Image (cartoon, rainbow, N blue to C red):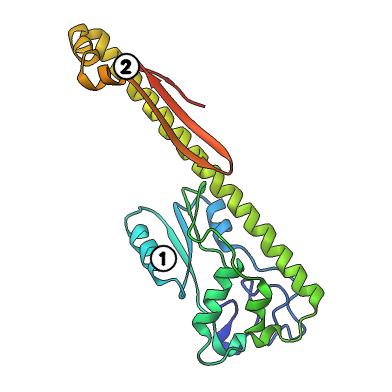
Amino acid sequence: DNEGYMNTGAQKSSSTPHFARTGSTPAGKTSRKKNLPEIMAAHGVPYVATASASHLQDLVRKVEKAKGIRGTRIITVLIPCLDGWGLPDDAGLMAARYAVECGAFPLYEIEDATRYTMSVTEKTRPVSDYLALQRRYRGLPDADVATLQAEIDGGWARLVERAQASRSEAARAACRAGSHRARKRGRQGRRNPASQARASRSPANISAGRPNSTAARLTKDGGETIGCTTTNAIATCP
């Protein structure tokens, strides 16, 4: 993703960001960048991810992961265009890194159109640092910079919310699976009372003072704790 039609002189495309100047938008693009990963996820693509040339280990990991998934897989990689963006010859990787750090190009994965995972979970610089590197944003009014910052903050908040919801759902699924295994063990114990009695007299259970009792706290995110408690093959999940 170089955010434009760069091999014909840097004209705007659907991927060109808001307010960016190109050969066909000399006063700045008046519409926002189209969100390709979300469009692909909405079509049910099994694996969608973003990556950047500035974060090579993350890129390699996502490529390897995609190779093991069946079906359509799409990884959008941010590659700055030196001429089209108006960057110095040695500033390409810096621009790619700033795009990630300010949240203009977040790194994340969407699996099965519903499970979101963020590769970088914090924004560490304002968008103004990123814009200052590029000639295509030179002279951008402060009001437009504030608009871009608000757009990025809103998109970031939605992404964080979806990633948190995905982690919570994964924890609940793990708890339900544990509950199913516990019920299965309980049924097996009732069919074999001698085996159940031996388990209750095991040293570990005797020293714990609570036969066949296990408590596990699965995950905690956003102040919400999701727990699962299993006692004598009876499980309680949130």
Q: Image quarter for residue 99?
A: bottom right
Image location of residue 76, percent across then percent down: 49, 67
Residue 22 in view in this figure: no
Task: Say left or right for 174 vs 89.
Answer: left
- Relative to 44, 67 lies left or right: left
Check the image and report above or below for 45 versus 217. below
Q: Where residue 185 sits: x, y (%)? A: 28, 18
Residue 83 horizontal/vertical position (percent): 58, 90
Disc on the earlier residue, 1 or 2 = 1
**Residue 209: mark:** 2
Q: In this orientation, which residue lies closer to the viewer: 131 or 45?
A: 131
Residue 150, above or below 166 = below
Relative to residue 118, is residue 58 depicted above or below? below
- Please, what secondary structure does the residue beneath circle 1 have? helix
**Location of residue 63 (image quadrant):** bottom left
Neighbour tally class for label 2: few under 14, some 14-19, many 20 plus, Cα within 10 Å:
few
* Residue 68 percent coordinates (x, y): 32, 55
Disc 1 to disc 2, C-alpha distance: 46 Å
Q: Residue at x 25, y 12 (%)?
A: 189
- Image point (60%, 90%), residue name: 9
Q: Residue at 78%, 74% (x, y): give it.
A: 144
Q: Name the amino acid, label 2.
A: Gly
Pick the residue in front: 84 or 103: 103
Residue occupying image coordinates x 56% and y 80% = 95
Q: In this view, does 131 lie to the left or right of 68?
A: right
Q: Can residue 87 be seen in this view?
A: yes
| Tag 1: amino acid | Asp
Residue position for label 1: 58
Mark 1, residues whose alpha carbon is within 10 Å: few (<14), some, or many (≥20)? some
Q: Look at discs 1 and 2 and give the one toward the viewer.
A: 2
Q: Quadrant of residue 19?
A: bottom right
The secondary element bearing badge 2 is classed as loop
